[in-house]
Image: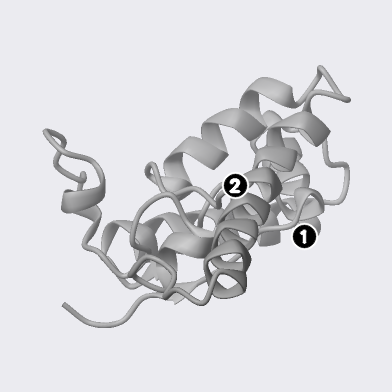
Amino acid sequence: MGEHTVIYLDESYLSNMAKAQLGSLTDQDECEFWLSLLEELKDKVLADRIACPEFAFQRKEAALDTRIEEAVGRIIDELSQGLRFNTWKDILNLQVEDAAFKFLGKDPPQREMWTIAFTSNPQASLKSRKPGECPEG
């Protein structure tokens, strides 16, 4: 397994790709750009070359525009394939836990580095992140 490049997609990217899918962009060149970017990202995700983790705020921001909310959600699902960033509360809890152990003069629990930021290993194969499901293509 090769190393994945982790790509965080800002809400504006997700929104523009959703608008292009829905046909709500008036500039044809812009529409083609966002649709081709989406297809390229999907291809690379399914080929296990990149990982596009979901972040909780992406869906919250998308919910502010009900016209694109559902399309953004589908794009997030297709690109993240179950990979998610931990919430800021989870990250804070891990940091507090580590600090408490250090304060007590003890070693913090051993954990893989990725567990601080992600709910699952972003370098794991797509198949292992989605048990029971095989990627298409």
Q: Which residue is mark 1?
A: 29
Looking at the image, which is closer to me, 124 or 10?
124
Q: Which residue is mark 2?
A: 90
Q: Residue furthest bottom?
A: 2
Looking at the image, which is closer to me, 60 or 32?
60
Is residue 79 depicted above or below 121 in this figure?
above
Residue at x 77% of width, y 48% of height: 11
Identity, as a three-letter code, of the amino acid under mark 2: Asp
Q: How is the image coloured?
A: one colour
Is residue 107 depicted above or below 29 in this figure?
below
Is residue 87 depicted above or below 124 in this figure?
above
Q: Residue furthest top?
A: 66
Residue at x 88% of width, y 25% of height: 64
- Where residue 98 sits: x, y (%)? 55, 66
- Where residue 47 sits: x, y (%)? 26, 65
Identity, as a three-letter code, of the amino acid under mark 1: Asp
Looking at the image, which is closer to me, 36 or 15?
15
**Count of marks, rendered view:** 2
Relative horizontal placement of residue 50, taking residue 8 as reference (left or right): left
Which image quarter is the N terminus in? bottom left
Mark 2 residue element = helix
Label annotation for residue 65: none
> Around disc 1, counting alpha carbons within 10 Å, would you say few (fewer than 14), some (14 to 19), or many (20 or more)?
few
